[in-house]
Image: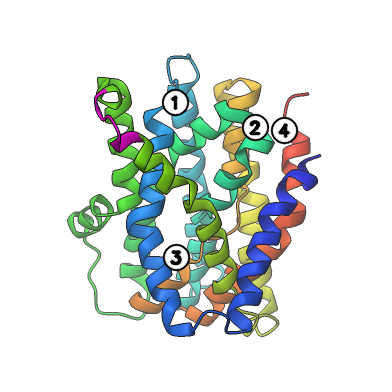
Amino acid sequence: MAFTAILPVFLVIAIGFIVRRLSVVPDSSWAAVNSFGYWILYPAFLFSTVASADFSGPDTIPFLTCLAVGFALAGLWGLSLRLWFASDGPAFTSLFQASVRWNGFIILAAAPALYGPKGLALIALGFGPVVAFVNLMSVLVMARWANNEIAPNLAGALREVTRNPLVLGSLAGLIANLSGLIDWLGPLEPALALLGRAAMPIALISVGAALSFEGLGKVPLRLGVGVASKLVMAPFLMLAVTHVLGLPPLPSAVAIGVASMPSAPAAYVLARELGGDAPLMAGLVTASTLLALITIPLWHSLTMPA
């Protein structure tokens, strides 16, 4: 059952939440934990997974195409929310981020049980391009409508994306895979794989530590719209894209699974730094993460081939 497969992932997230609330780890240390994961562990995981995967099958390019189109449609849906929330630019930017930002670490941790090795490899391959695309959209929207004096700048946004270590880790792994460089890395390859094995527990614990219940219940309409945009509309749009483009059943289920992930905690950081509605974003991340324990298995049962 999908619920049984995803439950251990959410239990680790719950452990992170409890550890943070009990101050087992000092609050001042979490920034260092997140930074170490972001710059070292997560890129190592993505590199080793992509570099050693087999992408010779015919589904790779159609899968990436569906991801690109599906997230573009989610971005258009997010932009349409401006019609209903035109009077509050910062709140709109948080709702936009809620529509497109996805917590990739949850699905990476659950992928072996949900989709098997091939599904994990496809997710790792798509991780970098999707992160880059979503970050680009989010930064441009934040620059245009958040409470700041930053002018929307495509070149600047692209610069930020190309510095993202998750994007670079995926790209380096793909280059190593396609060029055969992975066979020449010697002991470096198992060392990176060993680092990568520490990535998922740290990522999930960090997700739990970042959860905050303070913003829940204060703006129920906005929370409801944002959560529904991420957990219902985004996977529905991806489902439509996979059907229209004729993606085979397993890659289709994986693409819909990617779209069904809750909002990522990184959205809160961007909202806080660029003048978005940070309390609303924190509430959206928390609410979507909690409800995803129900919606992820539902989407999996609807789309995963028998």
Judging by the rendered image, the residue that carries numbered circle 1 is 53
Res 194 quadrant in image:
top left
At 56% from the left and 26% from the top, the residue drawn is 118
Judging by the rendered image, the residue that carries numbered circle 2 is 115
At 38% from the left and 72% from the top, the residue drawn is 32
- Using the numbered discs, state the Cα–Cα distance from disc 1 to disc 4 in whole angstroms: 24 Å
User: Disc 3, disc 1: CB below 8 Å?
Assistant: no
Report x, y in % for residue 154.
22, 55
User: Disc 1, disc 4: CB below 8 Å?
Assistant: no
Quadrant containing the C terminus is: top right
Establish if 57 lies above or below 75.
Answer: above
- Using the numbered discs, state the Cα–Cα distance from disc 4 to disc 3 in whole angstroms: 28 Å
Report x, y in % for residue 137.
37, 55
Judging by the rendered image, the residue that carries numbered circle 3 is 266
The answer to whether residue 89 shows anywhere in this view is: no
Q: Indicate which disc, 2 or 3, sits on the residue closer to the N terminus.
A: 2
Amino acid type of disc 2? Answer: Tyr
SS class, disc 3 = helix
Report x, y in % for residue 185.
26, 30
Report x, y in % for residue 290.
70, 64
At label 4, counting other C-alpha atoms closer than 10 Å, the crowd grade (few under 14, some 14-19, many 20 or more) is some
Amino acid type of disc 3? Answer: Ala
Left or right placement of residue 283 versus residue 156 in this view: right
Disc number lying in front (1 or 4): 1
Quadrant containing the N terminus is: top right
Q: Indicate which disc, 1 or 2, sits on the residue closer to the N terminus.
A: 1
Query: Does residue 238 show up magenta in the picture?
Result: no
Q: Indicate which disc, 4 or 3, sits on the residue closer to the N terminus.
A: 3
- The span shown in magenta is 184-189
Judging by the rendered image, the residue that carries numbered circle 4 is 303
Amino acid type of disc 1? Answer: Ala
